[in-house]
Image (cartoon, helix red, strand yellow):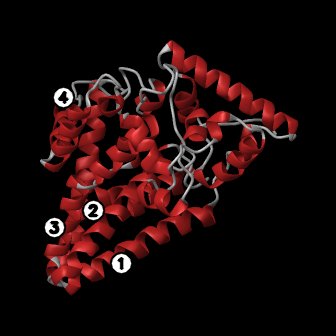
Amino acid sequence: MVERLAPEQTYFMHHSPSLGIAAALSTDRAEIRTVLKKHGLRIGDFSRPNTAIACGYILVCWLAIACGSLLWIKGGYARVPGLAILAFAQHALLMLTHEASHHSLFARRSLNNLLGNLCCALPIGQTVRSYAVHHRPHHAHLNAGGDTAYFLTDPSKSRRRIAWIFLSFLIGRVIWDLVLRTVYGSRADGTRDGDSASEVRLTERRRAVAVIGYHGAIVAVCFEYNLLDLWLAWVASAILFVPILDGFRTIAEHRRGSTDSPSFHTRSHHLYRPLSWVFSPFFQYHWEHHLFPGVPHCRLGRLHRLLVDADLAGARSAPGAILGAFIRGLA
């Protein structure tokens, strides 16, 4: 089978970060291809999304949202777990938006963008396109200065500085970041996305129009049924709590700790699956993902098992699952 990847996936795979990390990525990819060759396989054999599984992922997220919403509507102390469930479900939608940004949610491009936007991205204030623009430099400059996650993964930042960044999420950093990208094409940390500033501004303005239209309809329905407080809780959770969950995941997966080599790039954390599914849904095999971003999450498990059987070190989960990976990233 000939390996055929979308241009966006090729971009994600071949734009190099710093030389040491780029060399590590290249070595890891070569080792994986060698393992697959022994089994008569190529990475292209893992590259096709599964529509049924994608629909199942979306359904699980929205069932969780329904449960969280019912608890919020019930009122009283039930609103506390209700809000927590909403936050974790929103983070899961963000991870599915990530899948859509790699064109790995649905095989058909039109379906990938349509359902990726309507069911995953727009409910949390994103679009698939805006997420992709913001996400590309993370792959292109992994764990280096151009990485859009480097404000969290930079190993030179102290734990106190990291704590301050998490606090800034609680006081609206995401909104300020969005304003800067919309007006200037840059982010709160002063860096830029991979596209030009004008393209970033255009993308973010289109996102604003789409999000306002989408949520305007939701507000009308909530007003009719006296549920505006639920919508406000949803928006507050997406702005304040989801970035904290995503920051926690990012540090666990990418921040180089004191015991990691200078060429370290990614951790997987698939042990204790309930824990990983809560804090990093659809992202457990993250080492494999960064080596081959065109492989959908639903195929990564099979790829991972082949690599574990071949005893590739990078495929082993971080000790202690995602919590252990987070602690190691801060060590």
The answer to whether the residues at label 1 and label 2 have Cβ atoms under 8 Å apart is no
Amino acid beneath label 1: Ala
The answer to whether the residues at label 2 and label 4 have Cβ atoms under 8 Å apart is no
Instruction: Locate residue 318 relative to residue 45 in the image: left or right.
Output: left
Q: Is residue 22 above or below residue 139?
A: above
Secondary structure at numbered mark 2:
helix
**Alpha carbon of mark 3 to alpha carbon of mark 1: how far?**
16 Å
Point out which mark residue 214 bears: 2
Amino acid beneath label 4: Tyr
**Alpha carbon of mark 1 to alpha carbon of mark 2: how far?**
18 Å
* Sequence-first tag of 2 and 4: 4
Q: Nearer the viewer, residue 131 or 78?
A: 78
Q: Which residue is mark 1?
A: 66
Instruction: Locate residue 309 relative to residue 61 in the image: left or right.
Output: right
Quadrant in which the N terminus appears: top right
Mark 4 crowdedness (10 Å alpha carbons): few <14, some 14-19, many ≥20: some
The answer to whether the residues at label 4 and label 1 have Cβ atoms under 8 Å apart is no
Q: Which residue is mark 3?
A: 232
Q: Position of residue 185 (x, y in %)?
A: 24, 29
The answer to whether the residues at label 4 and label 3 have Cβ atoms under 8 Å apart is no
Q: Which residue is mark 4?
A: 184
Seen at 27% across and 36% down, the residue is 202
Q: Is residue 71 above or below residue 92?
A: below
**Alpha carbon of mark 2 to alpha carbon of mark 4: how far?**
24 Å
